[in-house]
Image: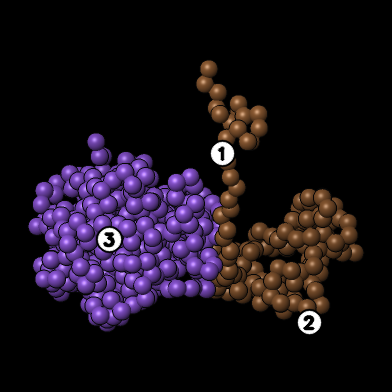
Chain colours: A brown, B purple
Amino acid sequence: MNVPITERLAAGSEVRAWEDTIPFRYEYTAGVAGEKFLRGLRDGEILAGLCPSCGLTSLPLRMYCVDCYAEVTKSVRVRPAGVVRALARGARTFAYVEFDGVKGGLVHTLIGSARVGSRVVVRFRPKRQRVGALSDVLGFERSG
Amino acid sequence: MIKRRVAVIGAGMTLFRRRMLETGRELSYEASRMALEAAGMSMKDVESVVIGTAPDAFDGVHMKGEYLIEGAGGVGRANTRVYVGGGTGVFTPVGGWWHVASGLFDTCLVVGEEKMSPLRPHPQSAFWSIFDHTTERPLGVTLLWIFALEMRRYMHAHNVTEEDIALVAVKNKMNALDHPCAQIASKITVDDVMNSEKIVWPVKRYDVSPPSDGAAAAVLVSEDVARKFTKDPVWIDGVGWNVDTQYWTNRELCYPAYVERAARMAYKMAKIEDPRRQLDFAEVYDPFDYKELHHMEGLLLAKKGEAPRLTREGVTQRNGEFPVNPSGGLLGVGNPIAAAGMMKVCEVFWQLRGEAGRRQVRGKRAERGLAQAWGDLLQCGTVITMKG
Ligand SMILES: [Zn+2]
């Protein structure tokens, strides 16, 4: 009977095997839209794209409209208060939050407790500590 | 067998640069939008999308096809990613061709993208992991090392000098001076190539194309749709591709037989019996200068060992009897892998439409041209022939 060799191995030492790695290191750019979005975070703002063609406001900020493919150069400040649509609880709790009048949303850490459907606000780091990264946002916190 | 004729009605590309701010999605978007605008189309008119992009390791995003999809316009459409290493750029429109030729779709947007700059310290390191982990990787080989072996073998087989090969780099970098997207266009001499840094002899710095960020795209349509949007379609009349074993040691390195097999497939479809006479020019894959010569022979545009002489005699100059790489090629325009092959297809389109400006071969509109790419581990040829 033909049994694959790996299934017949009782011990790794029965065949010659070795460990190796594929070491890759990266330096990413956020892109034209991403750069704008990150600068917004540094300034304590959530920026969404506003499509000049179909009027869609969407997150995350992109160079193009996800619905009609028009070029999006305009961004609008989103009121930093939204609704929890989903939660994942583990060592940290992550919340997926949508904002009023905006297609799409953001995932970030939940601060404190909330339920699906709870209204939350975006908590930013103190201004001095912001660097223009996703970590400028501490997370979402229940409002009211 | 083939059901329908397929036309190209628009093409576009981004700048090719060492490091762009744009993400891969944004590059794909810019090229796609330009191609659609050139075709007089909007995304609503597009039924299917084929994305070509080389190893995920470059952009540093696994499942790059899925990652690029919204920039390339594939969201909510019949979207496919194709991949045959460096051959991907020309394989992408081949994929688009079968979408339309089969009758399955009337329109297909084809997009080639590569963003190589994220990988540090150099994109070459991505290639280290493509080698066989038992017979080659323990040696710490790189692609440059293997190209040096192939170049040396070609030089030995046909008694070709390094200076002969350098002429290709001189020509292509010069041609690229007329390309508005070019990354490393320049006027250099054979001495400059000879005196450039030795990387792995006989490969020197100027023998090699640079790593780049960029994207290029084209709109492929059925004959009926072509007639609606343009009076001036360019037809894809032949496609071919062929892949050999990854054991590059199992073939004669001085001749790319897999390129010949791919070319013969395309020539048969296009009813080309004498490619040198029936084609007006060719965009031949030139990531290294010797590869242009190697590929000219594989494409049957020169006899074995004859390409260096044709180059020396000026036959392959833009105003020569058979121009090769009038765009400036990868050596001059740049080499964002899948976008680079796609750039060649765009160049053939622009040459056949008379839209290549100062790059126009022999100063006039060409009637018939070819684009070719090559990839995987010295094992794959992809070919497309087009006519006005
Ligand atoms: Zn829109």
Label 3: chain? B
Who is closer to the viewer here, A10 or B58? Answer: A10
Q: CA distance from mark 1 to mark 3?
A: 35 Å
Identify the residue under disc 2: A128
- Amino acid type of the residue that numbered disc 3 sits on in the rendered structure: Arg
Which label is found at residue A16?
1
The answer to which quarter of the image holds residue B152 is bottom left
Identify the residue under disc 3: B152
Q: Is residue A68 visible?
A: no
Which label is found at residue B329?
none
State yes or no: discs 1 and 3 in contact (Cβ < 8 Å): no
Coordinates of residue A140 in the picture (x, y in percent): 81, 63
Q: CA distance from mark 3 to mark 2?
A: 59 Å
Q: Is residue A17 above or below residue B35?
A: above
Q: Is residue A25 left or right of residue A42?
A: left
Coordinates of residue B388 in the picture (x, y in percent): 19, 59
Q: Secondary structure at mark 3?
A: helix
Q: Secondary structure at mark 1?
A: loop
Query: On the same chain: label 2 and label 1?
Result: yes
